[in-house]
Amino acid sequence: MANIKSAKKRIKVTQTKTLRNKMVKSALKTSIKKYETAIEAGNVDEAKVLLGSAIKSIDMAASKGIIHKNVASRKKSRLTLKLNKLA
């Protein structure tokens, strides 16, 4: 356990940031999973709407530094390809 005041603060700040990162990453995975279920079911209209929300959550995660911008770009590209193959 830390004794120094600044070290105690760093522990608190790290815990807060870790919690926020988990929350955003979890929301990201959920939105992608919803989109992929719509794709598997063959719902083109629903998939188009869910693609927008998935891309938005990917961009948000990338802007907060939770995922790298290249990873975000790759994910968006692959999700769009899936929709284009279906349509």
Image (tube, rainbow, N blue to C red):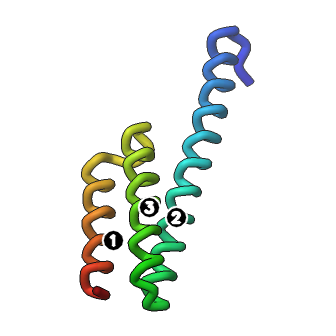
In the image, residue 29 sits, relative to residue 42, either above or below, namely: above
Mark 1 is on which residue type?
Leu
Q: In the orientation shown, which residue stands out farthest toward the front? A: 45
Q: Is residue 19 above or below residue 77?
A: above
The residue shown at (40%, 61%) is 52
Picture quarter with the C terminus: bottom left
Residue 79: which numbered mark, if any?
A: 1
Q: Earlier in the sequence, mark 3 or mark 1?
A: 3
Instruction: Report the number of discs.
Output: 3
Q: Which residue is mark 3?
A: 54
Identified at 66% across, 17% down, the residue is: 9
Name the spot of residue 76 as percent of width and height, x first.
31, 62
Q: Foreground residue, 28 or 47?
A: 47
Q: Is residue 5 above or below residue 56?
A: above
From the viewer's perspective, is residue 54 above or below residue 42?
A: above
The tag on residue 31 is 2
Cβ atoms under marks 3 and 1 closer than 8 Å? yes
Question: At which x and y percent is residue 69?
Answer: 29, 47
